[in-house]
Amino acid sequence: MRRRSWAEPFKIKVVEHLRMTTRAERARAIMDAGYNTFLLRSEDVYIDLLTDSGTSAMSDRQWAGMMMGDEAYAGSANFYHLESAVREFYGYRHLIPTHQGRGAEHILSKCCIRPGDTVPGNMYFTTTRAHQELAGGQFVDVIIDEAHDPASEHPFKGNVDLDKLSRLIARVGAARIPYLALHATVNMAGGQPISLANAREVSALCRRHGIRIFMDATRAVENCYFIQALEPGQAGRTLAEILRELCSYTDGCTMSGKKDCLVNIGGFLAVNDDGLAEAARNMVVLYEGLHTYGGLAGRDMEAMAIGIRESVSDDHMRARIGQVQYLGELIGGAGVPIVRPVGGHGVFLDALRFLPQLPREQFPAQALAAALYVDSGVRAMERGAVSAGRDPETGENRYPRLELVRLTIPRRVYTQAHMDVTAESVIALHEQRERIMGLRFSYEPKSLRFFQARFEPVEGGAVLRH
Amino acid sequence: MKTIIEPFRIKSVEPIRMTTRERREAILREAGFNLFRVHADDVIIDLLTDSGTGAMSSEQWAGIMRGDESYAGSPSFYRFQARLQEVTGFEHILPTHQGRASERILFELVGGPGKVIPNNAHFDTTRANIEHSGARAVDLPVAEALDPARLHPFKGNLDVAGLERLIAEVGRERIPLVMVTVTNNSGGGQPVSLGNLRAVRAVCDRHRLPLFLDACRFAENAWFIKLREPGQSGRAVRDIVREMFDLADGATISAQKDGLVNIGGLLLLRDPALLYRASNLLILTEGFVTYGGLAGRDLEAMAQGFEEVLHEDYLGYRLRSVEYVGEGLVAAGIPIVQPPGGHAVYIDAAALCPHIPRAQFPGQAVVCGLYRIGGVRAVEIGSVMFGERPPPALELVRLAMPRRVYTQSHMDYVVEVCAALASERNSLRGLRMVHEPPVLRHFTARFEEL
């Protein structure tokens, strides 16, 4: 079949200027940043693919909503708009807004997890696991094995392995499992979706054992796009219908609104259980803000309410994921090793196959992200051993099977030409991959080290040799 | 000149929806006689809080459009950091999504069982965060603060002799830091003098204790110092602000007050070891150190707000308009905390309603009366907010003034509503709490009228 393009279902209303830099300036900037792309000043970045979190462009309607912010401390009209949008599209009864997703994770973990509990999930996420561990819980990965194989073409690599889950329940007992954390899509596996059928089966199993399911719904609409595109029998349904069904298999969700919901700040916890909602409201007052604003300005709740409506539009999501797939086709088509199939929010370079000459102790993904910045000013993020941190018991580095560099695409921000520049830089770098040098820590923070760690090339000199 | 001219004109307006007394009666019942539970749409004049309810300037809105939403290293952060460094003299500036997050991080690090944290008067979220950590929050107001009718220029001052006694009693090692709230919110928005801050600093130095400010209303406090403290009238407010911060080792700030923004907070620290631990906790619970759980645009709005709040014609207008309401209430025979504070006028509910015993929450009765009569939303600061064991020193109702939002005619209306309430005070009825949440109960509690 001939290729069909995915033109954006919008035109541009406001622009933000970018600054071009020279290679010499970039080599200097990455050295000053300790070879950690998190520590670069964004002014020195040309195309910022560090994250799709909070970096999206809002629509004119969302900006109009920003002007409709009702900043009353209690009972803001914007809260009720947001509550009704969440009820309509996600279907949960109680909404507790939070300043962002980790605020919701913090509250959910504190409300539900007791020391010694086990929290199963389809692969860990950095801040989620940190909150579970802080509350005294232990995270156990029950994702299917294919998720850890970057070359597997399984269409739903985010699925939960029901056997692993059953064995875990038998081993620790349902009473020590406060809930199952279901990610849709799975970020650390490369933005991989779960199928509706899998969600249904997981739900049946958990309900049989009286275990609740809380979804990380941050990119659930993107997940629904894959269900619509790939799951038998789902092609004729709207994203909104699929989303309601997916949520119906769970007892609530945490949400970082900074992804699917198309806002720069905001999140929420949504649950069905009255008692849990009451406990969460008492806690949100302490940590976030009164339960009708949760630490958000009224205008930000309004922007999120409008963003939720825009996010379930089939046209929007086709263009969104179409752009990610386009970048994946360019890079993968040129023979660069990437995680297959291409996920919903980014293209993940497989650093182990990209840089086979570098041992894992030299953090190949970190080195590749630094080299990519030097080559073209594209900022990406390491998602490998540096992000995985150390084992809290042994103190040893954790080396996850996936050592990835994430090229995350902000929503509605970059054009096809920006994607072309990115692909050209990645491909050029792959051709001269032997010039990329390994890194070692020069400063290592204790928790969530990837944010603020500093590195240096193990052999001195530059990370990307001429 | 009697008329207060605002040093600005209006650029954007928000309609107010009128309600009838009958409708408000029904709303009040539905909300369990707790105004925190009333929809903002159903309020005519909202004096619930001055926190996050201010109007931003056109310059701040321009900053909102300019916000750079990069996850890390946003230029909006660097502009914000430079402005706050300039205003406060602190090198280390951590942004947080709001003030209570700054408090939570600070007390999670320095609090804990057995610890004691003195303050001139802790505010509700501060106290809750301290107690949540297992530590004890101790209020040390000066004696004048406890007499609402007494005129004293600095009723926010901390009782220095009381602080010495507390240190002697519990031992310095159990006190991780001494806090001073400027202005003193729970005590009536009353200012703290520079002289008092210096005296507290001297005690802290003697016992090698760090001094922290709860500096939400630092600019309003500085303006009172300029107006009232001998020898300070010739100084620029900026200099006074700088001296206040120079006396401290750290500060928590909710920028939703004197930062003139709708959302945002700060944690200022000098100690690098504490900064390191605070940064790690910030990343876990708030956001990365260059955005702290805020959008880039909010950092821009703060950078501009912390500049505008130091304009002396703004501060002159701000404090004079609060005083104007206070004069109106006094003229109507309503007992208030004297003199009026910086951000609010506090009605002495126990004096206004001597027929309602404290166990029946006279403050809450007044709050319900104001809403019923005129759709004015105020907040109880008394036994409902702070609990009855032990009861707080005063039963107050706070009329908090949002910044740059309401005009003089709105304030005239508020005074008329209060006057009407005073004339029917004997019909006000006490309340019984029928639903009591375990923490910060005033936000979600429900009541019945007796």
Image (cartoon, coloured by chain):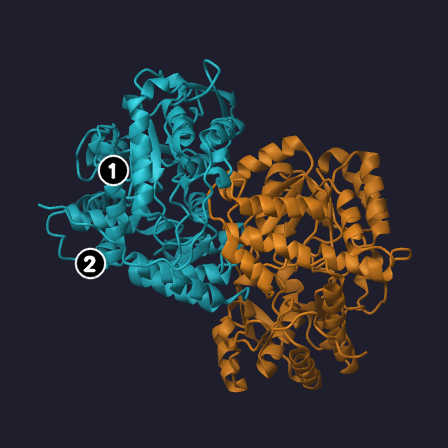
Chain colours: A cyan, B orange
Residue A89 placement (x, y as % from top left): 29, 60
Residue A105 placement (x, y as % from top left): 42, 45
| Labelled disc at residue B141 | none
Please report whichever mark, 2 or 1, sits nearer to the chain's N-terminal start: 2
Category of crowding for the residue at label 2, using alpha-carbon neighbours closer than 10 angstroms: few (below 14), some (14–19), many (at least 20): some
Under tag 1, what secondary structure? helix
Among the 4 quarters of the image, the one containing residue A102: top left
State the residue in front, A85 or A228.
A228
For badge 2, the amino acid type reads Thr
Q: Are marks 2 and 1 on the same chain?
A: yes
State the residue in front, B371 or A294.
A294
For badge 1, the amino acid type reads Gly
Q: Kindly give the residue lying farthest to the right in the view shown.
A: B231
Q: Which residue is mark 2?
A: A238
Q: Which residue is mark 1?
A: A328
Residue A81 placement (x, y as % from top left): 40, 66
Q: Residue at x 52, y 82 (%)?
A: B18
Q: Quadrant of the C terminus of chain B?
A: bottom right
Q: Quadrant of the N terminus of chain B?
A: bottom right
